[in-house]
Image (cartoon, rainbow, N blue to C red):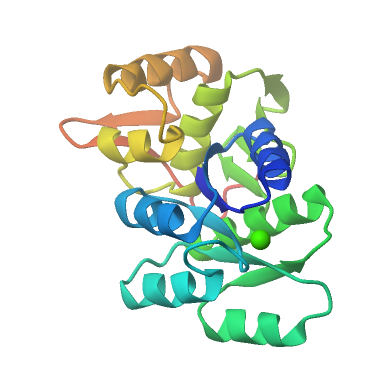
């Protein structure tokens, strides 16, 4: 899962980026509205954290432009404390949720998890595929209750596939959602991550759909966790 942070307070932006990276996300940062606009139009994000007071282009204008341009990534706005009109304008402008400054990083993380789940239509914070479980709150993965240790990129690949279980995900789509923008991308590495995941989790969970990509099956209705 890949998140864009749009915040001109550099210290705050760094804190958010660090916390999100530790939580298993690929993170890009923009410090002004124009840079944010460019990134949102050229990259694929699973969620955006958007400060409203920004240099060059303010957050509300950005948000309205994105929605007009059919960029529908869920957006969490950061508002000034007590500014109810910012919240109202933000939500009317297409924001999905808001957090008032100052905030606890944990609250932002929880809201992003919920936004991403809601945008995909997942009700639970624990994603399951048979014996395989991924808890998005703790970024922990287990098979049959036994914890499995993954590297950050292995986790991102698995998390993306599990958030989109039942659907074939192409290698190109995976690459867009597991790497930050400045990361040196190599499409062959996806195969390497998949091979390692199969070794660690067992070969049965991730299916290769020849010529198209990879798929993790949705548990059938009635499957017990
Ligand atoms: Ca600001």
**Can residue 105 be seen at all in this image of the molecule?**
yes
Which of the 4 image quadrants contains residue 216? top left
> Compared with residue 104, is residue 186 higher up or lower down, i.e. above or below?
above
In the rendered image, residue 88, in percent from the top left (x then y), is placed at 66, 86
Can you tell me which quadrant of the image ligand 1 is in? bottom right
Q: Residue furthest left?
A: 211
Locate residue 135 relative to residue 6 in the image: left or right. Answer: right
On the rendered structure, is 30 left or right of 169? right
The residue under the point 50% across, 24% down is: 153
> Does residue 164 appear to the left or right of 87 in the view shown?
left
Q: Quadrant of residue 187?
A: top left
Where is residue 70 shown, x and y percent of the image? 32, 71
Residue plotted at (71% across, 50% down): 109
Tell which of 193 and 141 is nearer to you: 193
Drawn side of residue 72 relative to residue 89, left or right = left
Question: What is the x, y in percent for residue 210?
Answer: 18, 30
Question: Which quarter of the rendered picture does the C terminus lie within?
Answer: top right
Q: Is residue 164 above or below residue 65?
A: above
**Residue that protrudes farthest toward the front in the picture:** 56
Residue at screen point 26% across, 36% down: 172
Is residue 170 shown to the viewer in this render? no
Residue in view at x 60 percent, y 85 percent:
89
Residue 125 appears at what percent x and percent y?
68, 51
């Amino acid at each position: 899962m890949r998140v864009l942070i749009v915040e001109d307070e550099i210290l705050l932006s760094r804190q958010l980026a660090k916390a999100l990276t530790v939580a298993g996300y690929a993170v890009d940062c923009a410090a002004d509205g124009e840079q944010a606009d460019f990134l949102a139009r050229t990259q694929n994000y699973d969620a955006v954290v958007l400060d409203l007071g920004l240099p060059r282009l303010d957050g509300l204008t950005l948000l309205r432009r994105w929605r007009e341009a059919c960029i529908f990534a869920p957006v969490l706005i950061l508002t000034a404390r007590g500014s109810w009109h910012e919240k109202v304008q933000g939500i009317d402008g297409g924001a999905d949720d808001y957090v008032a400054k100052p905030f606890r990083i944990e609250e932002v993380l929880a809201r992003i998890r919920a936004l991403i789940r809601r945008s995909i239509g997942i009700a639970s914070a624990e994603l399951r595929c048979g014996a395989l479980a991924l808890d998005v709150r703790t970024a922990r993965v287990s098979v049959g209750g036994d914890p499995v240790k993954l590297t950050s990129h292995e986790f991102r690949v698995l998390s993306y596939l599990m958030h989109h279980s039942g659907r074939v995900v192409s290698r190109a789509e995976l690459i867009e959602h597991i790497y930050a923008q400045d990361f040196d991308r190599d499409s062959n590495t996806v195969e390497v991550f998949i091979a390692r995941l199969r070794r660690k989790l067992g070969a049965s969970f991730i299916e290769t759909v020849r010529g198209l990509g990879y798929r993790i099956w949705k548990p059938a209705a009635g499957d017990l966790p």
